[in-house]
Image (cartoon, rainbow, N blue to C red):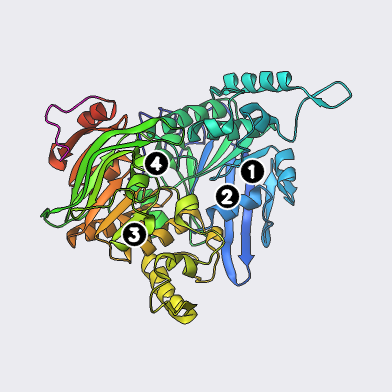
């Protein structure tokens, strides 16, 4: 639940001993960056309240906090995107006023945002040198040969492995992240801020990121790592600062605390990593998929005769490495992608290639994997997003006229139940943190009381307290006799929640196991394309 990969998998990078002097990367313990008593207010809302943060040279320093705790607001002030209401920032001991990102960059600070800022039609090299292009002679003509050579040099130096000529639109999310890191290094970053860097990565890409961080700190560079994933903090970070509801709670040596300690400091109470579920009493099939064949965006076969079944009163977990057809399956089930052949049946009725509205009206709800593109209308308010799918119905509208009071009352209740922060119905969705955007989507979908809930990466970007709550919500749906299809890249999440586990590889189901039969080694073999001798694909 707290992240992908084990501490050993992510690399034995720890050099700190409990109570020790700091990083073991050859750097000094002197602070590279100090943020002192930083307070940031937006009107009457206090996002940061007198927070202290110090990052040493040559360390990975984690910044941990709940969704909406003020982590991104804090680092945005360090990067010059916001200015503090009060407090001071010191770079290598010198007081600096961060008026804009150019000041931060000139002081050796680079930032990789949670949602990448790349130009899709441009090449990797063009994105990296954009704004600081090498020129030929006095005419100022772009020297792309020199740009590619510089990108290759940096790539090799830090083990980032990018193709300088590849188009951004054609490379994986993990590769795009490496481009963002190279872009910051090209501009001379000595401190690299990574905002939720593993939220969109596969387990394999997380391991690779760990190697990149080791390479950076070995050269004396520092990393400020914003993440919810406790296992990754334990594996990657030297120290960790915890904030809660905009206030500093503690700064700890990571080697001296457990994941449970970090979780409790973050949410202010003990957090249970176990999921309580009632007895398993599956009913009739709610969703049946037969021999489904679907093409990807490039017109290539992606689902190649996939079959599965989800029953009432069960959670079927779909496990697999990212890119094996999970996204195309969810889109085909929800009417967003055309099925080439095969069938989708809901309670015995064929719904293949029905419109999203028809599928929704039958009692199928979806938590989409991409909250930005599929889950929200970013410019709409939180309240408007919460009623998107039922705004045509009473009490939210009558004869085509919206009842704003009914919408607001409904939204206030869901905001309270799902702990959306800040608790403001008229706040635009795009202004929420990624985790709170996810809470809005989950609140909307679960509150519709669906017969089938398709949950695609439902806890991506959520903190441990929110993950605990989402897991309870999914288990409650199952205990009420509803069907849940859980699509997750987090194997721990699948193992914690699922009653049965279907493994997808290469667009096919390679095996279906009861939870009590499933072991990580067996699932890993199926995820790599091996087949279970007793495959049950229903």
Q: Nearer the viewer, residue 140 or 299?
A: 299
First in sequence: mark 3 or mark 2?
2
State the mark number for residue 178.
none
Residue labelled with disc 3? 358
Residue labelled with disc 2? 53
Residue furthest out toward the right: 138
First in sequence: mark 2 or mark 4?
2
Rounded to the nearest angstrom, the CA distance separating label 3 from label 4 is: 54 Å
Question: For the residue labelled by badge 3, is the local secondary structure a helix, a strand or a loop?
Answer: helix
Q: Position of residue 398 (x, y in %)?
A: 43, 80
Q: Position of residue 190 (x, y in %)?
A: 65, 34
Query: Quick check: marks 2 and 1 in contact, CB under 8 Å?
Result: yes
Query: Quick check: marks 3 and 1 in contact, CB under 8 Å?
Result: no
Q: Residues within 10 Å of mark 3 (few under 14, many from 20)?
A: some
Residue labelled with disc 1? 33
Count the marks: 4
Q: Residues within 10 Å of mark 4 (few under 14, many from 20)?
A: some
**Position above or below: 171 against 465:** above
Asked whether the viewer can see residue 433, the reply is yes
Q: Nearer the viewer, mark 3 or mark 2?
A: 3
Rounded to the nearest angstrom, the CA distance separating label 3 from label 2 is: 51 Å
Looking at the rendering, the stretch of residues picked out in magenta corresponds to 530-538
State the mark number for residue 256.
4
Specify the quadrant that holds the N terminus.
top left
* Secondary structure mostly seen in the magenta stretch: loop
């Amino acid at each position: 639940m707290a992240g992908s990969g084990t501490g050993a998998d992510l690399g034995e990078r720890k050099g700190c001993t409990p109570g020790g002097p700091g990083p073991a990367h050859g750097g000094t313990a002197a602070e590279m960056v100090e943020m002192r008593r930083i307070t940031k207010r937006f009107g009457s809302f206090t996002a940061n309240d007198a927070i202290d943060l110090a990052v040493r040279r040559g360390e990975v320093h984690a910044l941990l906090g709940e969704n909406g705790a003020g982590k991104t607001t804090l680092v945005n002030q360090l990067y010059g995107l916001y200015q503090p209401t009060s407090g001071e920032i010191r770079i290598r001991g010198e007081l600096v006023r961060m008026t804009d990102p150019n000041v931060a960059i000139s002081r050796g600070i680079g930032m990789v945002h949670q949602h990448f800022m790349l130009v899709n039609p441009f090449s990797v090299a063009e994105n990296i040198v954009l704004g600081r292009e090498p020129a030929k002679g006095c005419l100022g003509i772009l020297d792309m040969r020199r740009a590619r050579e510089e990108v290759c040099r940096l790539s090799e130096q830090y083990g980032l492995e990018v193709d300088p000529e590849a188009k951004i639109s054609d490379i994986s999310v993990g590769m795009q992240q490496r481009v963002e890191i190279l872009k910051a290094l090209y501009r001379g970053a000595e401190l690299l801020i990574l905002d939720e860097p593993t939220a969109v990565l596969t387990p394999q890409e997380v391991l690779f990121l760990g190697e990149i961080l080791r390479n950076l700190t070995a050269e004396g560079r520092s990393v400020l790592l914003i993440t919810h994933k406790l296992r990754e903090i334990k594996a990657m970070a030297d120290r960790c600062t915890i904030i809660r509801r905009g206030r500093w709670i503690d700064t700890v040596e990571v080697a001296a605390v457990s994941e449970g300690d970090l979780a409790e400091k973050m949410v202010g109470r003990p957090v249970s990593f176990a999921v309580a579920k009632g007895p398993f009493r599956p009913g009739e099939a709610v969703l049946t998929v037969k021999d489904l064949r679907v093409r990807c965006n490039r017109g290539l076969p992606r689902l190649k005769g996939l079959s599965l079944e989800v029953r009432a009163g069960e959670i079927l977990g779909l496990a697999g490495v990212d890119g094996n057809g999970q996204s195309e399956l969810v889109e085909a089930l929800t009417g967003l992608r055309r099925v080439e052949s095969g069938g989708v049946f809901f309670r015995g009725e064929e719904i293949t290639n029905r419109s999203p509205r028809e599928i929704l009206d039958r009692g199928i709800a979806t938590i989409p994997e991409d909250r930005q593109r599929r889950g929200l209308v970013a410019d709409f308010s939180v309240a408007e997003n919460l009623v998107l799918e039922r705004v045509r119905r009473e009490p939210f509208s009558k004869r085509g006229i919206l009842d704003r009071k009914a919408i607001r009352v409904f939204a206030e209740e869901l905001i309270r139940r799902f702990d959306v922060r800040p608790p403001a119905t008229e706040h635009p969705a795009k202004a929420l943190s990624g985790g709170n955007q996810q809470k809005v989507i989950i609140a909307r979908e679960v509150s519709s009381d669906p017969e089938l809930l398709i949950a695609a990466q439902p806890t991506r970007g959520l903190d441990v307290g929110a993950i605990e709550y989402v897991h309870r919500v999914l288990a409650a749906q199952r205990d009420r006799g509803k069907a849940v299809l859980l699509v997750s890249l987090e194997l721990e999440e699948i193992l914690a929640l699922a009653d049965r586990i279907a493994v997808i590889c290469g667009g096919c189901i390679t095996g279906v196991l009861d939870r009590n039969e499933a072991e990580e080694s067996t699932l890993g073999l199926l995820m790599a394309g091996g087949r279970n001798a007793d495959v049950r694909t229903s």
